[in-house]
Amino acid sequence: MSSAVRFSARTGRTQTPRALTRDEVRQVDRIAIEEYGLPGLVLMENAGRGAAEWLAELAPASTAVACGVGNNGGDGFVLARHFLNRGLPVRVLLCGDPTGLRGDALVQAGVLARAGIPLESPPPGEAAGSWLDGVFSQSDWIVDALLGTGLRGEVRDPHRAWIDAIHRAEKPVFALDIPSGLDCDRGTPLGAAVRATCTATFVAWKRGFLEPQAREWLGECRVIDIGLPPGLLEQHFA
């Protein structure tokens, strides 16, 4: 049985879902922003809010959101804020130097900070792994917002250490867009990858999700609508 059939079993559909390559994912964002005038900040907001709605259905008692400094981390910032709005306990952990935040992710980080949720990092002098072990032990779910679909090379530290800590925690993991470290086009780990319980992927499946070897990394996979104009995918990616 293919991974496509397996993950559509919940709806009873067996057709191969629409799937985008790494380059097509970037084109979708460019077309939405440049041709339709839909700001990237709106797309990020819709992605994070939609993912938050699904995770809230799973009723986590407490959640740790592990974020990188790129746009995948920005999606995690949005999810955390919507959890705050729902009165759900959430902590946001930042992998990387906060000065590396740029663009829409930086905006969302600022909103989050003003809403009262700090970006937490390992204390000076404490190893990231031991600090993460302590935080994750107190969490009901872990959200993986470390690395997105643009990753091409092998995962290296500090992200490798964070992925290892997520595995050690043995907690349910909710991946945003793609499990960190999974190759978007091939569905195989780039040295290391998060094993997700659930994957909230945005716009459409990714090409690598159709490969049988991707099953063990994705868990249950749902496509989250981020508000693209009707017909955009059909017109440009038929």
Image: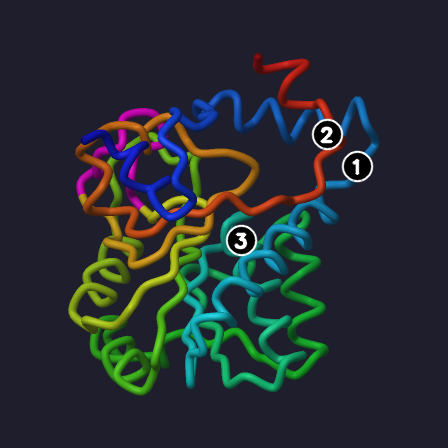
Residue at (50, 43) in percent of width and height: 223
Tell which circle, 3 or 1, labels the residue nearer the N-terminal end: 1
Q: CA distance from mark 3 to mark 1?
A: 25 Å
Residue at (34, 48) in percent of width and height: 179
Q: What colouring method underlies this structural image? A: rainbow
In front: 181, or 201? 201
Q: Point out the frontmost of discs 3 and 2.
A: 2
Residue 177, percent from left and from top: 46, 46
In front: 51, or 168? 51
Mark 3 lies on residue: 100
In the rendered view, tell whether residue 165 sits above or below residue 106. below
Labels 3 & 2 near each other (Cβ < 8 A): no
Labels 2 & 1 near each other (Cβ < 8 A): yes
Mark 1: few/some/many CA within 10 Å (<14, 14-19, 20+): some
> Label 1 sits on what residue type?
Leu
- Give yes or no for residue 187 being in the magenta stretch: yes
Mark 1 lies on residue: 38
Q: CA distance from mark 2 to mark 1?
A: 5 Å
Residue 9, percent from left and from top: 33, 43
Residue closest to the far front? 12
- Give yes or no for residue 106 being in the magenta stretch: no
Identify the disc placed on residue 161.
none
Residue 162, percent from left and from top: 28, 62
Q: Is residue 128 left or right of residue 238?
A: left
- Report the quarter where the C terminus lies: top right
Q: Secondary structure at mark 1?
A: loop
Mark 2: few/some/many CA within 10 Å (<14, 14-19, 20+): some
Mark 2 lies on residue: 32
Stretch in magenta:
181-191
> Label 3 sits on what residue type?
Gly
